[in-house]
Amino acid sequence: MLSYFQAIVIGLIQGVTELFPISSLGHSVLIPAWLGWDKIVGAQSASESFYLAFVVALHVATALALLWYFRADWVRIVRGFLRTLRTRKLETPDERLAWLLIVATIPAGLTGLALEHALRTLFAKPLSAAIFLTLNGVVLFAGESVRRRASVRALVADHPVSESDAEVGRRLDTLDFKEAGVVGVAQIGALFAGISRSGITMVAGLVRGLDHEDAARFSFLLATPIILAAGVYKLPDLTGPLGNGIRGQVLAGSVAAGFAAYAAVRFLMRFFETRNLMPFAIYCLVAGGISIIRFA
């Protein structure tokens, strides 16, 4: 059904691609198809799928890796949130960021509860994933193009800027709640296999004037509760028939995903200090295009 080798390979890929803006769900569909793992391919779009239950467990491991990497940020954010409950005011960047994350989490959270399972089973097919992966590349290209427009530079100039020397951008805590809501709505796109959660939320942040480092930080902070909550909600599936025969593989894959995700977020936070989304856009267009040809 699912070997330990397959579990570890998919876990490593998921841990990296969940954070790289190239879609973990898309790769969890495409990689088994490319490698000829037919039993996994057949399980991807089943209404009751052991493979989707397995992928959910990998998501929990990824979220825990994110939580650990940003642990200092989350301590400040939680403390800020608790202060706002006592004072009824937003006085510090951490307090404001806490509520920005709450507002941005609501759209994807509600939509995920209603449609996540249906969308995954409907679009968890190699050709669909290849098409959406190509579209993801277009979105990344478009985001970089819009970020360079005069209107976005003017938006940056109207707000306090971040302290980054490599790129001028507005501070993360200057986003208003409407803008945070737009970023949250953008995150809904990640329900389609091939559309990257981190990529589409980074683009939403970039077009509102954030620099690449802060756009990535907000994207990863925003992803953590969504991924963790969705995983914990679905994890009980593994205690039933869907988990039979794969619980050991789930553990092996989850460990691999957790370590890969931690390495990925460390790399990306340094990468986006000086670089942009263009390499990932090119990869998505090339990999998606080749996959469309292969699975059409």
Image (spheres, grey):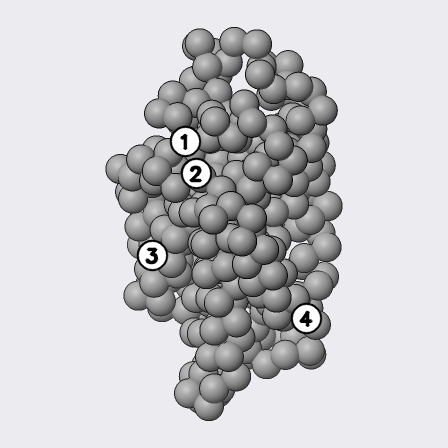
Q: Which residue is mark 4?
A: 275
Q: Name the spot of residue 175 as percent of width and height, x first.
A: 41, 69
Q: CA distance from mark 3 to mark 2?
A: 21 Å
Mark 4 vs mark 3, CA separation in Å: 25 Å
Q: Position of residue 281 (x, y in %)?
A: 58, 65
Examine the rendered structure and indicate whether residue 208 appears above or below residue 95. Answer: below
The residue positioned 45% from the left and 54% from the top of the image is 132
Which residue lies at the image location 39% right of the left edge and 53% below the top edge? 189
Label 3 secondary element: helix
Judge whether 3 appears above or below 263 on screen.
above
Q: Which residue is mark 3?
A: 185
Residue 213 located left or right of residue 236: right
Amino acid carrying label 4: it is Arg
Q: Secondary structure at mark 2?
A: loop
Query: Do the CB atoms of the residues marked 3 and 1 lie less than 8 Å apart?
Result: no
Q: Nearer the viewer, mark 3 or mark 1?
A: 1
Which badge, 2 or 1, is on the more N-terminal residue?
Answer: 1
| Real-space CA distance between mark 3 and mark 1, rounded to the nearest whole angstrom | 25 Å
Residue depicted at 64% across the width and 14% down the height: 248
Amino acid type, label 3: Val
Residue located beneath label 1 in the image:
45
Could you say where residue 205 lies in the image, as x and y percent from the top left? 46, 67
Instruction: Specify which label sits upstream in the sequence, 3 or 1.
Output: 1
Q: Position of residue 19 (x, y in %)?
A: 59, 50
Look at the numbered disc 4 and give the secondary structure of its residue: loop
